[in-house]
Image: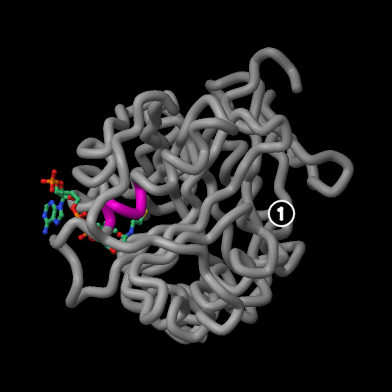
Amino acid sequence: MPEEAWWGVPTAPEALVVEAAGARAWLRPDAFDTECFGIPMAKVEAAAGARSGAVGLFAACARVAGEQGWVHLAARVPSEQTDLVRALEEAGFYWVDATVIFGRRLVDTTGPGEVPIGLALAEDLPVLQALGRGAFRQSRYFVDPYLDPAGKDRLTDQWVANALNGRADRVFVAEPKKPVGFAACRLDRRGRLATIDLIAVSSDSRGRGIGRSLVEAVCRHYEPIAERLEVGTQLANTQAVRLYEAAGCRLLRSYVTLHWVAPELRAGR
Ligand SMILES: CC(C)(COP(=O)(O)OP(=O)(O)OC[C@H]1O[C@@H](n2cnc3c(N)ncnc32)[C@H](O)[C@@H]1OP(=O)(O)O)[C@@H](O)C(=O)NCCC(=O)NCCS
């Protein structure tokens, strides 16, 4: 990656390079999003070059997306790069999400709480999918008015199914006999960083310490294995932010996500 990178790492050779106004961006089709929403979707996964060319570059990304038949683009920018957020907006992208990443070192995890926690079984899938469908309403997909609601549910269902089918290292459930919450966790290849990929508690069981018990169980499990825990959420998700703070996590970094849609999708065609 060139040293003047603004964000991201391109996954060459799959990424398509767009060059304009002395800057470059790497666009990559997103197979998972495309399948869930049934429309061709892609990401601006990295960008670099002359910052004065940012508006021209992002406008060129939109043009290239049109040529490729991609009707939806997503770009996630470190939040301190406000000039790039403005440039994306000027080029027709719209703001959907501020993501905050929290983390803590995995030491001194407190003892087991009162809520029984176990590991998810394959047969828990429908219950966990129902929990997920009622939960992730603040994600960038859910707040995007141009994305089909049925696709949003398919995305949640598929994400939960993938977690149980090996995307997650472990899926913890609260009240294992009749799950009322779950946390799906990933472990990086070197085994140093554990990440909570998904966490949800059923709406009628929230505020009773179940989320806290899930995070503590995650920390206890990974403390002998990994050095750090990280988890991301939306800035607007006060309950999740407070949950992670209560579990000893601190804010590490943040991003702004913007989407762009082709005129036909914006017009509902
Ligand atoms: C976020 C979520 C998992 C928390 O689970 P929970 O079981 O309600 O959380 P707990 O009862 O264990 O509370 C843990 C902390 O969260 C905070 N919290 C809980 N309910 C809250 C509320 N209604 N408002 C503000 N803070 C709240 C509290 O600070 C609490 O810590 P404390 O007990 O030390 O005060 C749950 O609200 C949820 O499923 N939300 C929808 C899915 C979601 O947003 N997941 C995270 C996406 S990244």
Q: Secondary structure at mark 1?
A: helix
How would you classify the magenta stretch by its main secondary structure?
Answer: helix
Report the side of 12 relative to 216 (left or right). Answer: right
- Image coordinates of residue 59 in percent, x first then y, are 58, 46
Nearer to us in this view, 111 or 207: 111
Report the side of 151 relative to 20 (left or right). Answer: left
Residue 176's place in the image compared with 54, above or below, is below
Label 1 is placed on what type of residue? Val
Nearer to us in this view, 255 or 117: 117
Name the quadrant containing residue 117: bottom left
Name the quadrant containing residue 177: bottom left
> Does the image show residue 82?
no
Name the quadrant containing residue 253: top left
Report the side of 34 relative to 263 (left or right). Answer: right
Residue 166's place in the image compared with 45, above or below, is below
Q: Is residue 214 magenta?
A: yes
The residue at label 1 has a CB less than 8 Å from ligand 1: no
Where the N terminus falls, by quadrant? Answer: top right
Q: What's the residue at 72%, 65% (across, down)? A: 31
> Does the image show residue 107?
yes
- Image coordinates of residue 72 in percent, x first then y, are 57, 64
Work out which residue is located at the far left of the displayed protein and give it. 207
Q: Is residue 4 magenta?
A: no
Picture colour scheme: one colour
Count of numbered badges drawn on the protein: 1
Residue hosting label 1: 64
Q: What's the residue at 44%, 28% (across, down)? A: 106
Q: Which residues are magenta?
A: 211-215
- Image coordinates of residue 122 in percent, x first then y, are 61, 78
- Image coordinates of residue 43 in percent, x first then y, are 63, 52
Residue 174's place in the image compared with 99, above or below, is below
Ligand 1 location (quadrant): bottom left
